[in-house]
Image (cartoon, rainbow, N blue to C red):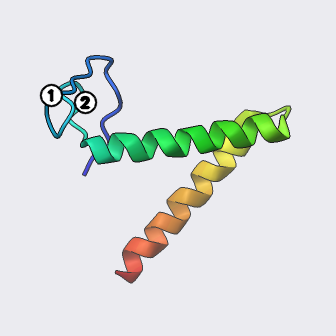
Amino acid sequence: MKFSPCTGDCTSNEDRCGGCGRSREEITETQLITKQLVEHLVKYNYDDPEKFLENVNRKAIKRSKKAQESN
C-alpha cells in the first residue's frame, strides 16, 4: 500500500477520508506518532532536529524491511 499524505480536503462522514483516502484508524495513529515525535523534540530541544528525524527515518525503514522479510 502506498502512503497518501493529507491533502487538506478532509471529510469526516465516511470510514475513509475523502481527501487522502486513508482510514480513520491510520490517520489517528499517524497523528499520535507525530505528536510523540514533537514532544520528544521539545523535551530534548535538539539544535539539529532534522538530524534526529533523519536517524529515526533511517532506523524505521531498516527495521520495517527486516520485519517484512521475516514474515
Residue 20 disc label: 2
- Residue 66 point in image, percent of width and height: 48, 73
The residue identified by callout 1 is: 13
In terms of image quadrants, where is residue 69?
bottom left
In terms of image quadrants, where is residue 38?
top right
Q: Which residue lies furthest to the left in this view?
A: 14
- Secondary element at image label 1: loop
- Residue 57 point in image, percent of width and height: 58, 49
- Quadrant of the rendering where the C terminus is positioned: bottom left
- Identified by mark 2, the residue type is Cys
Q: On the picture, is 40 further left or further right than 9? A: right
| Foreground of the two, 11 or 9 | 11
In terms of image quadrants, where is residue 3?
top left
Q: Which residue lies furthest to the top in this view?
A: 9
Examine the rendered structure and indicate whether residue 2 appears above or below residue 5: below
Q: Residue, x 46% and y 38% (percent of image)?
A: 31
